[in-house]
Image (cartoon, grey):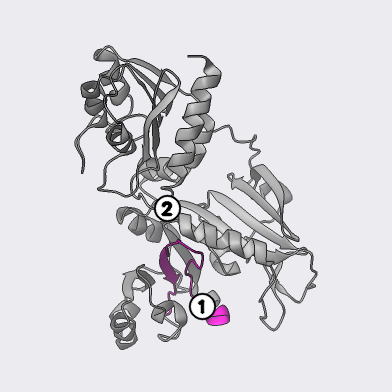
Amino acid sequence: MTPDRDETFLARALGLAAKGAGRTSPNPAVGAVIVRNGRVLGEGFHRRAGLPHAEIEALRKVSGTARGATMYVTLEPCSHHGRTPPCADALVEAGITRVVVGMVDPNPLVRGRGIRRLRRAGIEVKAGVLKEACLRLNEDFIHWVTTKTPFVTVKLAASLDGRIATASGDSQWISGEQSRRVVHELRNRVDAVLVGAETVRADNPQLTCRMRGGRDPVRVIVDGRLTIDPHARVCTQPSKAATLLFTSEAQAQSPKAAVFTRHGVEVIGLATDTDHRIALRALLKELGQRGIKSVLIEGGGQIVASALREEVVNKVLFFYAPLLLGGDGRAMIGPLHVERVALGYTLHTLTVERSGNDVMVSAYVGAPGRNHVDRNLTY
């Protein structure tokens, strides 16, 4: 087959994989297409952890036999027994003669083994087709499986002069309707959404996904002093998603913590510093152990500043509204203690686009004080 045809069918597999985004944790999102003589015989995607992988879904859709066909799959077929049997063995048994892979699986249990299994069986394997797109689709999985902590994105909506609220605390709505729709699409895809106590007190958010067919992410609240109201909407709003409240070890044993527990909120105690702040690295480690591979931090400014200072932020997504609130408004990011411009937090691989009347800026976060070239995702 020509490279163009390989890319065409791999792009089709990518589109299928995207349907599972946000549903498969801790597994990656994967799509597969089976083709013979230019005709699609079957296709599928991984829907949820514990259910069949994309390759098996595609094989089950084939009417007749897949013998002699080509399998296009966005991620290297697994070669180990997990919740499901190895997909590489299934492809061998089905008589697939060629496999086109988007990217090698970074999971140490698989990395390269699935491809070697296929080649030992005489199957032709071509890897790295549309690799960058496949890597971006599963950048959260890659980060989680290699660090055991979630991929962290910071989302903020601000005025053009960088204010997330007026001096009085009014913040609704800075961003426009289209931008708010994008945020609900994000909540539909990430595993968890995280806010600090100041956001709960100021905005009383639900942190749910209000789009048709969407699903709520796990809701995470960081409140070292346990100051929020147990009757806040995020604690009482009915949802299939869990609500996790991280506080100090002492507060986790307090009578007030028991009130949250009665509302169905899981209260988790972690060590705090002298200012009652929770180390976000420890919090993210706990979330990673629970199979949460992506976290969206939605504010406020203090929790975002803490995340940046601890260098746990991988990506930022800022919505700038055509609005000015002035220097007495609340800054979008709290103190970072940057004393020289050269030591500022650097962003790279920026994309800028319109979101209704707003400007949406996304970028990856580099280490403070270092220059970073635009990110070419290679693994």
Above or below — where is 299 with respect to 256?
above
**Image-based side of 330 in relation to 76, left or right:** right
Amino acid bearing label 1: Val
The stretch in magenta equals 200-225
Label for residue 200? 1
Which image quarter: residue 338?
Answer: bottom right
**Is label 2 in a helix, a strand or a loop?**
loop
Amino acid bearing label 2: Gly
Which image quarter: residue 114?
Answer: top left
Q: Residue at x 78, y 73 (%)?
A: 325
Most foreground residue, 311 or 50: 50
Q: Main secondary structure of the magenta part?
A: loop
The residues bearing labels 2 and 1 have C-alpha atoms spaced at a distance of 24 Å
Above or below — where is 114 with respect to 125?
below
Q: Position of residue 173 (x, y in %)?
A: 67, 74
Residue 311 magenta: no
**Is label 1 in a helix, a strand or a loop?**
helix
Above or below — where is 64 with respect to 230?
above
Which image quarter: residue 165?
Answer: bottom right
Q: Residue at x 40, y 31 (%)?
A: 33
Would residue 36 be visible to someone looking at this image?
A: yes
Label for residue 22? 2
